[in-house]
Amino acid sequence: MMDVALIADRNQSQLVLIDMQTKLTSVMPSEVSAVVKNIATLLQSVTLLEIPFLHTEQYPKGLGPTVPELAQHLNGKKPVEKTAFSCCGEPTFSRQLSRDHSQVILAGMEAHICILQTAFDLLAQGKTVFVVEDAVISRNPENKLNALNRMRQAGVIITNTESLVFEWLAVAQGDAFKTISQLIR
């Protein structure tokens, strides 16, 4: 029997979108458009399923705001502004992170810097951490691969967008299932 903690539970999950900003995305490899699409799917899914989420911006004065393709799905939420690479290094982030949700799902960039450091800090806090492999990116694909391997070895659950949203749904029925099924096509 599989450990329940290995499956994302929408009642225990919270999504953290890290630093998907205009100036950063402009220097990413071509797969950034697929990453943005997957993150948009995650944001729409958390809204439908009423899963809490936060988003951060690293030094927005210099790196710009969250990309418009994602900003439209943030429901007017203000970003947590940070200069620390780990989101946990920003007190506002720690205050806004839900204590009632033991699973933290990470998406955004860069995988080998902010995602990795945040994942390790959340593990140290006792959270179950998921990183959505097709919703994270680094300028250098080898750095992303290295980061995913390091996180996996440390106990982070590496997943993908489609697996995650279907774990949240749990059953193939209802309006949320119909809508999310359309999003992943």
Image: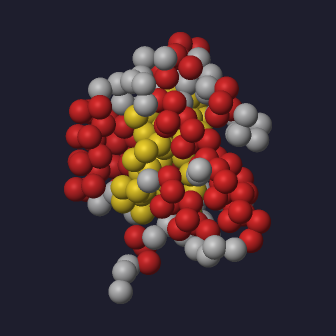
Residue at the spot 71% in from the left edge and 63% down from the top edge: 178
Image coordinates for residue 64, horizontal then vertical, percent: 59, 17
The answer to which image quadrant residue 60 occupies is top right
In terms of depth relative to the viewer, which is nearer, 34 or 27? 34
In terms of depth relative to the viewer, which is nearer, 49 or 166? 166
Task: State the residue lying farthest toward the bottom.
Answer: 1
Q: How is the image coloured?
A: secondary structure
Judge from the rendering whether residue 128 lies leftward or rightward of residue 171; answer left or right.
left
Quadrant (top left, top right, bottom left, bottom right) of the N terminus: bottom left
The mark total stands at 0
Image coordinates for residue 3, horizontal then vertical, percent: 38, 79
Image coordinates for residue 143, horizontal then vertical, percent: 26, 33
In terms of depth relative to the viewer, which is nearer, 135 or 24? 135
Task: State the residue lying farthest toward the front.
Answer: 185
Residue at the spot 39% in from the left edge and 24% down from the top edge: 29
Residue at the spot 43% in from the left edge and 73% down from the top edge: 5
Residue 90 in sight: no
Judge from the rendering whether residue 168 lies leftward or rightward of residue 3; answer left or right.
right
Residue at the spot 29% in from the left edge and 60% down from the top edge: 155
Residue 41 in sight: yes
Task: State the residue lying farthest toward the top.
Answer: 62
Instruction: Tell me: residue 41, above or below residue 101.
Output: above
In terms of depth relative to the viewer, which is nearer, 119 or 48? 48
Image coordinates for residue 27, horizontal then vertical, percent: 43, 17
